[in-house]
Amino acid sequence: MNENVKGSIKAMAVLLCIAIASGLLLAICNDVFYYEAGGAEDFNALLSGNWALVEVAEDFTSDYGTVSKVAENGTSHAGFIVVGNGSGKSGAYTMAIIIDRATNKVVAVKTIEMGATSSGYDLSQDQLDAYVGIEIADATAFDVIPSGALVAGATGSSKAINNAFKVAGAYYTIHYLGGSAVDPTEEYLGYLGQISTETFTKADVDGSIAVNNGRLLLVATSQTQVGFYVESTSDGNYVDNGAYRVAIIVDRATAQIVSAKVIEDGATIPGYEVGQTTIDAYVGQAITSGNVFDNFEGGLIDSSSLNAGMTNTGWTQSSRTVRNAFSIVANYYYNAFLGGKYLADLETLATGETWTIVPFAPSTPYVDATILCLAQSSSGKVGIVVSAVSDGVNTTNIMNGEYIVAIIIDGATDEVLSAKIVKDGWVSMDIFAVPQEKVNAYVGTVITSATVFDTFEGGLVAAEGYLNYGETNTGWTQSSRAVRHAFQAVAGCYVEYSENIGG
Amino acid sequence: MKIKDIIMDGLFRQNPTLRLVLGVCSTLALTTSAFDSFGMGVAVTFVLVCSNVIVSLLRNVIPDKVRIPAFVLVIATFVTIVQLFLRKYVNALYANFGVFLPLIVVNCIILGRAEGFAFKNKVGLAALDGLFMGLGYTWAMVLIGGVREILGFGTIFGIKLWDFSIGFFASQSGAFFTYGVVIATFVTIWNAIERKQKLKSATAGVKDPATIAEEKEEN
């Protein structure tokens, strides 16, 4: 055997030995560092403990997704690996969620596998943490996406993640709380039907509006009314009652409460129930601010003859709990339906003015646009906040989301005084953002008719060159046309307002 | 070779990231945050030390003609161990590293040190070389990652500093830009230090270590 062959055999032998040694080492390491996706490690990474996987109920899938793994940390926490179905442009999200079994609150969450098409549409851990602290009382716990976790430009991802929470919430409700995961919407709508003849449709709840001393179980709208089903809790000490569930109907034209009924009385001591006569004191009251009922005493019951439930304020806690239900409704209605949450935007556009919201419902709803807020200032200015997504032309490849625009009009001269974009609807590329100077192009226009902006092109952005992506057949970007459509809706609203109310 | 030289070479004189410009792919891709940069630095340091030790131990056994496949085999083993460890215990880093974790196998720094140093030196020195080359890589990564995270996201190690951020620094173009600026700054400062040392040595009539080393090589 010559030296070359010997050398080759030695080389092969050495390599083989190294490979065998490597293989042995890796075999040991593989056992030591064994990892199974969705296993106890994922939960341990979120919350250290002694996690053990438990059997998942086989039948558990819903329209929102699937529970793929369940683990328990003794009896203190339940952990879920859940797949939330995709929404919009987002694919399915796999999430790890941990719930404290003592408080039924979410204590930790993390993304195992994102469904967004790019990390730019994903939610950060800070945004996910908006779910931490939410209590699961029933399957509706995640009907509302927390405001911090509803990310503009990533709404598909936000909804897919919320789907995961809905599934986890439903599973937890059934298997840990012994409740039902049946969607209670129909039941709640039935309660509204007991006090209104209108046909209601469930509306999305705006999670950015704070709800104190209770929660909104249902918000539903009809053509002329808004219906609420609310659960309220006490705001004080010496509480002798449980939560109250109250159905309340608000008239959209007048912002008045037109009917209300206690559906579940939380009184635990006979005699403390809140009767219909007491509830009727709220009927006819107009919601003029978010805290209109905070000091309203017309619906409170004097506790002087009811010693056991007496409070230091002289009113029964049960009647105060019911008042909280009305306070929740007033605060929500004022901010969401009267646009109270947009007053700050009008104030920044017209400083030094005192604004009063005017309830306004257009005679016919605007196509692809919604008036969010209409307010009159102390010096006669009219402020309108409007939402628009598009003008309805060639929307197949529309690239932008909702635009919210605040506009100030001089009530005396009908001239647009100032305007600004409150919420920018561009989704993926800031080149489609509508610059302020384009918004300013509308300033100075006198609103002489509802169609004054229909052919106005001063505020449009040409869809040329690198803006071709998203180009429409009219040569203007959809985003700038959405802003113009907002002005078109404002013109229609202002004309109707001037003729019928303000004029 | 003096231990001091190994330390200075690894950390500064032959810093793999800032002087030798090795391992550029991972440097550019993973320096979006200081934490990821630190994690990658630690992972590379671990592989460097372990592979240097094994290569040095086997330097008299491994035939010359198969040394590179042998190095790759050894390095791949330790990279796989790091991969298994991170997947189990630091899942966030494992997910963030993506393909760049297995790519440590072909990282020029590790292969370069195995070939250029460990294969020719004793175990102790090889381990020391791996450690300080790794630390040199780590501090450079953390510096670049820190700058990019502060400017690109307004945070450092995930802690929010302010709301201000410049998206450019979070992008790949920002990675090239920051890397270039950091190299330029480092080289300028290091050259100035070396000039000062030379001047000091010349004034004292003593040759500086670098000149002595150069002369030795020439002879």
Image (cartoon, coloured by chain):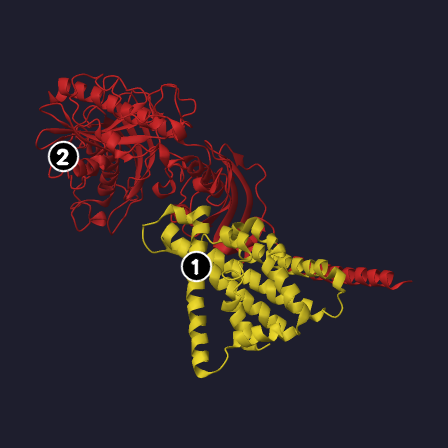
Chain colours: A red, B yellow
Q: Is residue A113 above or below residue A29?
A: above
Badge number at residue B184:
1
The disc at residue A355 is 2
The subunit letter for the residue under badge 2 reads: A
Instruction: Kindly identify the residue that appears in the image at 22 percent across and 24 percent down.
Output: A490
The answer to whether residue B106 is left or right of residue A204 is: right
Amino acid type for the residue under numbered disc 1: Ala
Residue B20: name its quadrant.
bottom right
From the viewer's perspective, is the residue at label 1 or at label 2 nearer?
Answer: 1
Quadrant in which residue A269 is drawn? top left
How packed mark 1 is, by other alpha carbons closer than 10 Å (few <14, some 14-19, many 20 or more), is some
User: Is residue A9 among what the camera can see?
Assistant: yes
* Image position of A204 (left or right of B92): left
The quadrant of the image that shows the N terminus of chain B is bottom right
Task: Residue at 22%, 40% (x, y): give it.
Answer: A319
Give A465 or A147, whichever is nearer the viewer.
A465
Q: Chain of mark 1?
A: B
Dot 1 lies on which element? helix
